[in-house]
Amino acid sequence: MDPLVELNGVTFGYGAEPVLRNVDLHLHPGQFAALLGPSGAGKTTLLKLTLGTLQPQQGEVCIHGKALQGRIAPHVAYVPQLETVDWSFPVTVEHVVLMGRVRETTPWPWPSREDRRRVAEVLERLEIAHLAGRHIRDLSGGQQQRVFLARALVADPDLLVLDEPTTGVDMRTAESILHLLADLNRQRMTVLLSTHDLNLAGAHVPWVICLNGSVVAQGPPDEVYTDAILSETYRGDMLVLRQAGLLLVHQKPHGHGYRDVLPEPVPGARPAPAAGG
Amino acid sequence: MDVLLQPFAFEFFRNGTVAAVLVGALCGAIGVYIVLRGMSYIGHGLSHAVFGGAVVAYVMSINFYLGAGLWGFLAALLINATVRRARVNPDAAIGVVTTASFAVGVALISRYRNFTRSFDAALFGNVLGVTPQDVAVVAGVTVLVALALFFNYKRLLFATFDPEVAGVYGVPTGWMDTLFALILAATIIASMQILGVTMIAAAIVVPAITARLLTDSFDRMLLFSTLFGALTGFAGMYLSFYVDVSSGATVVLLQAALFGLTLAVVAKRRSLAQRLVHTHV
């Protein structure tokens, strides 16, 4: 099978020092992969190179076998980090999702019947149809993530790229987002995401790519999650535990816990239960 | 009734009113995109930059609209490029580009002291001196800007909301920036004679933020802002006839009053809603 995405010998930097050096990476149709690495490892940069919004200084990025050469990647949809969104902008959920149809739609300001049909279908599929008329600020973190996922899906992409979709949401919401992505992947959607959550990625994503300036390792979490590989990726002492079929990753404390630093912490107090309560 | 219709007996008033309504609507519509892009200061800055262009056009003996328009367009492009490529904050980019452009005008005026033309109208507006030709220019710009906004509505909305991501979805963001710079320069040139450099900024920003207070919908914000601009343009002209105050200043003062009133009503409604919530908890 030919790869959907190819990064061949890609080097890129914002200044004199490259952020990514000689990266080779292939992503095949139907794959579900997570980019892991510390802050500054080049995860977002690699995603932007894949999208074609950044151009490599050396090497090439190909989508469906064709080098981008300064073009935006075709049939690729992107879900940005939620913290980059202007939540006070006057738009409803439906408005945001309709933006995903901007390539296919008519030049008229109003949405076509087909636009409305596709948006309704995707909102239904992501179980947020009842939120269509709501302002984006009035949603929970999980609902906000679904809205931007819906915008990506109405564009009918071959590849879905998500920048830290589980950041800033609680554990349960993060898990539901990854279940949703797994469902989409089962329907043959290729998914590439970046995340800081090693445990969540280890449990839900079948292929992980450890990145820190270059690809340190890639493969199924069972093979890649080792003390040695993760310590090299995060440049720290990482500990991998295997418990009840789960992979749990923790950074080893640097020789002390809070008791070493705070020998006499100010104690808290539990309020007394209310009388008759 | 005759008293109320009396101002319309004068041609200068009819010309001025049509121009003020069109300019009010134009600034109101453009203001929505400017406010939402976080570039509220651009109207103020660019109108000063265009003043520099007007002086250059005069010195080089080229058409005012062409010279000042081209100057404003290039200044707007330069601001956009500085913000996007050099990742400089919009207010800083506007400050650098427009004050430098304005300084060119001031430098030329001080160098060629034998200026015979007064730039008072450009600085403070002269709606009563609006000629039928000026009205034709304002009407032409209004129609062109309306068409540009109509046919690029979806792309401009996406590029305003999320400029970095819009490109991934196929919006030609570079072209949208160029188009917007062109629209902005044309709006400022068309408004300069009517409102004057000093009033344009307010006419662009105030109707838009007033509309923003009233709605969470982009469509309605665009509609309200355009209507507020047009209505205050008309009312300001009318009022200025009777109170004998500068028309540009009256338009802007009415807009500011409308903003203050809206703010008070919205604040009152919010506090009432909060009190209702507390009462029911």
Image (cartoon, grey):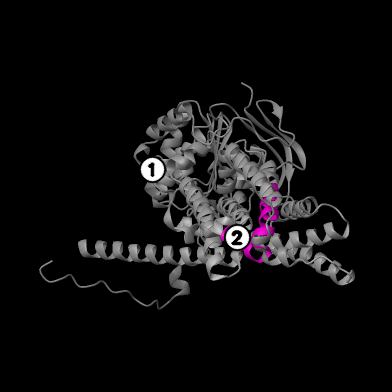
Please indicate, yes or no, whether residue A215 appears anywhere in the rendered image: no
Q: What is the x, y in percent for residue B13?
A: 60, 58
Start and end of the magenta stretch?
B181-205
- The x, y position of residue A277, in whole percent, is 13, 66
Q: Quadrant of residue B46?
A: bottom right
Q: Which mark is residue B5?
A: none
| Type of secondary structure dominating the magenta stretch | helix
Q: Residue at x 32, y 66 (%)?
A: B271
**Residue beneath disc 2:** B40
**Which element is circle 1 on?**
loop
Circles 1 and 2 on the same chain: no
* Side of A252 relative to B278 (left or right): right
Quadrant (top left/top right/bottom left/bottom right) for the N terminus of chain B:
bottom left
- Tell me if residue B98 can be seen: yes
Residue lying farthest left?
Answer: A276
Amino acid at the residue labelled 2? Ser
- Residue B259's spot in the image, x, y percent? 47, 64
Q: Which residue is mark 1?
A: A133
Report the mark closest to the observer, 1 or 2.
2
Q: Quadrant of residue B92?
A: bottom right
Q: Quarter of the image holding residue B270?
A: bottom left
Q: Nearer the viewer, residue A37 or B4?
A: B4
For label 2, the crowd category at 10 Å Cα-Cα, with few meaning under 14, some 14 to 19 and many 20 or more, is: many
